């Protein structure tokens, strides 16, 4: 394998620096709807992702986690704020200037079938980015290099090399997701944003893919932003978790700190609401009401309409995300736990 | 709801303005051709040319020309055809329109009723020989050109079998106004109605059947079955009602273009003095004012019908109501 | 969860025996569901759990008589209150559907007809089965919506499906299903399309139905957590066949089939220590035509050996874990699955119990974490006692 060096070349040296790989500063994404309404899908989020970590973005529908995921890679343009990748401001880079950056950040989507062209062989699909982007030496990759790389990729995601000659419909959902992962890894990225990558899969297959993500991360030194609504999956893979509600991060911290000692009442309710596969588990009374429409976001704390601990101040004043521990922040006036 | 209607009305006015400007530009501002000569007709005398130039303001800037034309069309309504010895164009259309409207409305009634019946029955009996037979009939209807079918109908009812008891009631070609003699009106139009409707019955029944069959796989049709409703009720109240959204949009456009002059062939074959035939005559005589007027008339109908369809949508589909 | 074990005298509400469903495709019959049997007692909640393609939804659709694709073959028996549902004429079925057996579906957005209001659609079901005026029907609709926790029910009844949130739509769906007081409610993935906090509300609502409406529920889901929280009895389907069935407590504590055990193990835990790797099941479930002649799970099973491979597939046998009788008492006895219930309650379609090597009890991660206080050997039999509130 001639190109195996590319993995270490891109992954190893970065770990020494303590600078974040990805930084998000007060990012907003607003959609304008008819009748002059606005939908604030992402409403002022600041985050940083360190090299080698896995940041989980969790929340229910309409919380903006997928929009944020797309904004991170500039697949959607932000309305305001800044996105820095490897210290470089990519918020307003042109498509052309973005192209070399795109090699180092990739995305894996939920729908494994829709993201693979059904009329083309898997090998051709995977080879495409390798043909479009120049190799590490700045020159076009040779046919042999590409072929070798394809075999390497198949090996990485534990698929037989024969899969390269087949079409997407010939694979099961889990295998297709492996192919999608292989495609994301083709250019040896540093950052992979995965948007609900396992939620369309059956439980027994889901575990395989979660393990694959973890293995690849350890092996290639990857950094993930893992977007999912399934808390258990996010917990399994993430080092840190950001809980989102109606476009904002309400709690951010080490995975088990957030899930087991949640400081925000929403994080607590979200964790409690997940049905455990254990008989006799005692569950707290579920949250009442529905998630408000993101178009008509409540004033004050965005969670106050459903919060069991709501007080007068929550209705009037929006809490900022503030630090309550060394690596634990919460946007709540009356947090349940102090970091 | 009111807002949506008003907004739609505003759009309609805007589109009409756009179309009129476009039509005007195509006919009167094409570079390299003198509109005066076109209006005055072939071999017109210099005096006529001068008169036309004065009347239409062709020696003045384009916007003025456009305004003059619109004034003559809609306000003073004295746009006259020079080819046809000064016949006023607008009253001519006003005389032709009821004929066309009579023809198209009757045909529309026939094709809507029959295509809904055929499409629904075919969908209900999907896969049986009745379904296949009805759809085959539809296909035959689509494949028969209306002028041919019209001639065959004339041949049978006017000459070959006119003297038999079956067709002796059929009057000669031509139109009888409804206000003069309703029964005569009906007798004069019933064969043109059927001939014009045949192709649309074919198209609409096939489209409706396909739509109903596709809908039968929808979740809400399964829910309706799980509720214990009768198959007829499921098909009509849930399937057909939902299909009407597609049906109406298709119908609105076809209806409008027919009223706007699209029934030309039927009108010519049956000697009905409608708008289509008028357009046909204007084109053969290169009667520019008349062409201009019929095109505008047709555009008004298509745009108005579109607006009506959109408003019907608001009633038929609550999702559209909220999206506005 | 209190397990209400029905008194043995009463006939079950629903008794399904050897249900098979096959669809024709290219001249062959594809067996989607093979020999599924179960019983559902009055006021019971039975969970039908399996992955996609396991045949769980097809089973429910077959019971409702909703499968009408040409050439489909449904055999076996499904007795509902003594009436045979398999082969029942559509006309007769229609009287049961909606009135005696009601169904709710996964996606409440697409399950309502988009062009009618919620109230209109509930009224329609009521008036299809009962002679009521429009006004009376609407009054009941509003009352039902209120009981399902829909705020401002009278106004909500006048709204269209797309104007409601997912949670409200599912509440309306349940209200519609309950509108004629059915004795059996079939819920096909009722919470899969919902957010987790809303799912919790809907599951609470479904659980409460047996006391407020006296309904039995057949809950179809892929989520083991939902089953554990909601169902009295669980039936695990794998590739169109029953893998295992038993009281939920027993089944989750002592999975009798390696598939159940592996499935439970592969769910990432939310509590306790985080495993380094998830114990995943290799491969994927077989397609119906590639289903092995012997045990369908054999190619993915860690316990596979020679006896698993030849046809026929292993029959359901008692696993030996029986809260009422002594354990391992009749593990080798060939008790027919139809035999009424004095002793065994849990059955697995696996050769292991018959060979005297049943699976070890399941260790949950919370038990691992709290190892100092709980006994690591699993649940003592007393914790399965019937009716004991938690």
Image (spheres, rainbow, N blue to C red):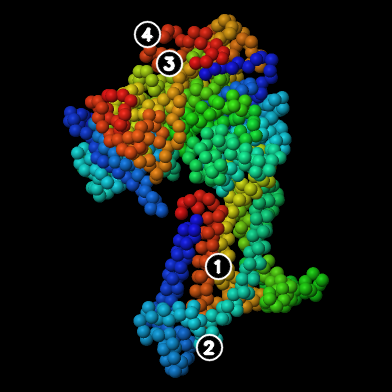
Q: Which of the two discs, 2 and 1, labels the residue nearer the N terminus?
A: 2
Residue B201 visible to an observer of this rendering: no
Whether labels 4 and 3 share one chain: yes
Q: Nearer the viewer, residue C376 or C173?
A: C173
| Crowd band around label 4 with a 10 angstrom C-alpha radius: few (<14), some (14–19), many (20+) | few
Picture coordinates of residue C177, whole percent (x, y): 60, 35
| Crowd band around label 2 with a 10 angstrom C-alpha radius: few (<14), some (14–19), many (20+) | few
Q: Which residue is label 3 attached to?
A: C364
Element under disc 1? helix
Q: Which residue in the rendered view is the most extreme toward the front? A: A312
Q: Which residue is label 2 attached to?
A: B86
In this rendering, position of residue A50 left or right of residue C85: left
Mark-to-mark CA distance, 2 and 1: 28 Å
Mark-to-mark CA distance, 4 and 1: 83 Å
Picture coordinates of residue C65, whole percent (x, y): 65, 34
Q: Nearer the viewer, mark 4 or mark 3?
A: 4
Mark-to-mark CA distance, 3 and 1: 71 Å
Whether labels 4 and 1 share one chain: no
Mark-to-mark CA distance, 2 and 4: 109 Å
| Crowd band around label 3 with a 10 angstrom C-alpha radius: few (<14), some (14–19), many (20+) | some
Q: Which residue is label 4 attached to?
A: C372
Q: Which residue is label 1 attached to?
A: B257
């Amino acid at each position: 394998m001639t190109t195996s060096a590319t993995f270490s070349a891109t992954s190893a040296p970065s770990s020494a620096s303590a600078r974040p790989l990805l930084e998000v500063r007060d990012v907003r994404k607003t959609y304008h709807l008819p009748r002059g309404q606005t939908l604030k899908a992402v409403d002022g989020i600041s985050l940083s992702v360190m090299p080698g970590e896995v940041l989980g973005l969790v929340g229910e529908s309409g919380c903006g986690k997928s929009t944020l995921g797309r904004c991170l890679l500039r697949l959607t343009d932000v309305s305001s704020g800044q996105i820095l990748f490897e210290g470089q401001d990519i918020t307003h880079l042109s498509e052309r200037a973005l192209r070399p950056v795109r090699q180092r950040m990739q995305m894996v989507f939920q729908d494994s079938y829709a993201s693979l062209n059904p009329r083309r062989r898997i090998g051709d699909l995977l080879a495409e980015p390798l043909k479009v982007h120049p190799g590490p030496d700045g020159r076009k990759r040779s046919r042999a290099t590409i072929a070798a790389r394809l075999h390497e990729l198949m090996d990485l995601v534990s698929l037989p090399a024969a899969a390269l000659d087949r079409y997407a419909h010939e694979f099961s959902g889990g295998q297709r997701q492996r192919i999608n992962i292989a495609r994301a890894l083709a250019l040896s990225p540093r950052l992979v944003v995965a948007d609900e990558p396992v939620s369309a899969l059956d439980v027994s297959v889901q575990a395989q893919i979660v393990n694959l993500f973890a293995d690849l991360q350890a092996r290639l030194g990857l950094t993930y932003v893992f977007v999912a609504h399934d808390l258990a999956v996010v917990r399994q893979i993430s080092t840190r978790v950001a809980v989102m509600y109606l476009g904002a991060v309400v709690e951010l911290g080490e995975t088990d700190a957030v899930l087991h000692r949640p400081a925000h009442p929403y994080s607590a309710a979200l964790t409690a609401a997940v049905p455990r596969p254990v008989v006799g588990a005692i569950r707290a009374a579920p949250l009442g009401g529905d998630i408000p429409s993101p178009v008509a976001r409540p004033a004050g704390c965005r969670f106050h309409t459903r919060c069991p601990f709501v007080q007068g101040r929550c209705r009037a004043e929006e809490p900022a995300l503030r630090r309550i521990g060394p690596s634990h922040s919460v946007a709540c006036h009356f947090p349940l736990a102090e970091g | 709801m009111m807002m949506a209607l008003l907004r739609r009305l505003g759009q309609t006015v805007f589109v009409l303005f756009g179309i009129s400007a476009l039509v005007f530009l195509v006919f009167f501002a094409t570079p390299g051709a003198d509109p005066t000569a076109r209006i005055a007709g072939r071999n017109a005398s210099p005096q006529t040319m001068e008169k036309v130039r004065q009347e239409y303001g062709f020696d003045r800037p384009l916007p003025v020309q456009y305004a003059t034309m619109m004034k003559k069309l809609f306000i003073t309504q004295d746009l006259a055809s020079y080819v046809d010895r000064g016949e006023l164009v607008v009253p001519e259309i006003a005389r032709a329109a009821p004929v066309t409207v009579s023809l198209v409305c009757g045909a529309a009634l026939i094709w809507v009723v029959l295509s809904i019946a055929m499409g629904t029955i075919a969908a209900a009996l999907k896969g049986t020989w009745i379904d296949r037979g009805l759809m085959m009939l539809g296909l035959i209807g689509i494949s028969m050109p209306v002028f041919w079918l019209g001639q065959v109908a004339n041949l049978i009812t006017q000459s070959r079998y006119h003297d038999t008891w079956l067709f002796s009631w059929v009057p000669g070609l031509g139109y009888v106004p409804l206000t003069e003699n309703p029964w005569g009106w009906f007798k004069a139009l019933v064969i043109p109605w059927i001939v014009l409707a045949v192709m649309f019955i074919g198209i609409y029944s096939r489209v409706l059947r396909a739509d109903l069959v596709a809908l039968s796989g929808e979740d809400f049709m399964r829910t309706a079955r799980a509720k214990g409703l009768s198959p007829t009720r499921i098909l009509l109240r849930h399937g057909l009602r939902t299909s009407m959204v597609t049906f109406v949009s298709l119908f609105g456009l076809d209806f409008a273009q027919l009223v706007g002059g699209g029934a030309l062939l039927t009108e010519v074959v049956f000697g009905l003095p409608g708008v289509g035939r008028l357009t046909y005559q204007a084109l053969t005589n290169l009667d520019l004012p008349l062409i201009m007027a019929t095109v505008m008339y047709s555009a008004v109908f298509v745009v108005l019908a579109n607006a009506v369809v959109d408003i019907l949508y608001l009633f038929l589909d609550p999702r559209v109501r909220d999206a506005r | 969860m209190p397990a209400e074990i029905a008194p043995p005298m009463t006939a079950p509400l629903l008794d399904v025996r050897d249900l098979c469903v096959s669809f024709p495709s290219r001249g062959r019959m594809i067996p989607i569901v093979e020999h599924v049997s179960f019983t559902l007692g009055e006021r019971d909640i039975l969970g039908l759990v399996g992955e996609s393609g396991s045949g769980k939804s097809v089973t429910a659709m077959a019971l409702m008589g909703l499968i009408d694709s040409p050439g489909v073959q449904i055999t076996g028996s499904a007795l509902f209150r003594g009436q045979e549902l398999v082969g029942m004429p559509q006309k007769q079925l229609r009287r049961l559907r909606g009135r005696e057996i009601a169904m709710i579906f996964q996606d409440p957005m697409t399950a309502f007809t988009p062009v009618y209001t919620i109230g209109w659609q509930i009224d329609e079901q009521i008036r299809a089965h009962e002679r009521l005026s429009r006004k009376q029907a609407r009054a009941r609709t509003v009352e039902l919506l209120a009981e399902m926790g829909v705020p401002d029910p009278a106004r909500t009844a006048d709204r269209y499906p797309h104007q409601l949130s997912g949670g409200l739509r599912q509440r309306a769906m349940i209200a519609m299903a309950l509108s004629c007081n059915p004795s059996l409610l079939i819920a096909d993935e009722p919470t899969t399309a919902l957010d987790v906090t809303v799912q919790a509300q809907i599951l609470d609502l479904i659980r409460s139905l047996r006391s407020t409406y006296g309904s039995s529920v057949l809950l179809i889901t892929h989520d083991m957590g939902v089953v554990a929280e909601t169902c009295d009895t669980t039936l695990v389907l794998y590739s169109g066949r029953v893998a295992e069935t038993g009281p939920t407590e027993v089944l989750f504590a002592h999975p009798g089939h390696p598939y159940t055990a592996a499935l439970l193990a592969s769910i990432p835990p939310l509590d306790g220590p985080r495993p380094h790797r998830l114990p995943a099941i290799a491969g994927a479930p077989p397609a119906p035509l590639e289903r092995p002649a012997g045990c369908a799970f054999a190619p993915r099973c860690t316990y596979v050996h020679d006896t698993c491979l030849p046809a026929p597939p292993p029959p359901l046998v008692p696993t030996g874990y029986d809260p009422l009788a002594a354990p391992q008492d009749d593990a080798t006895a060939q008790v027919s699955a139809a035999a009424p219930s004095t002793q065994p309650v849990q059955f697995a379609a696996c050769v292991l119990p018959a060979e005297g090597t049943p699976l070890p009890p399941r260790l949950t991660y919370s038990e691992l974490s709290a190892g100092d206080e709980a006994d690591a050997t699993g649940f003592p039999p007393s914790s399965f006692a019937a009716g004991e509130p938690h």
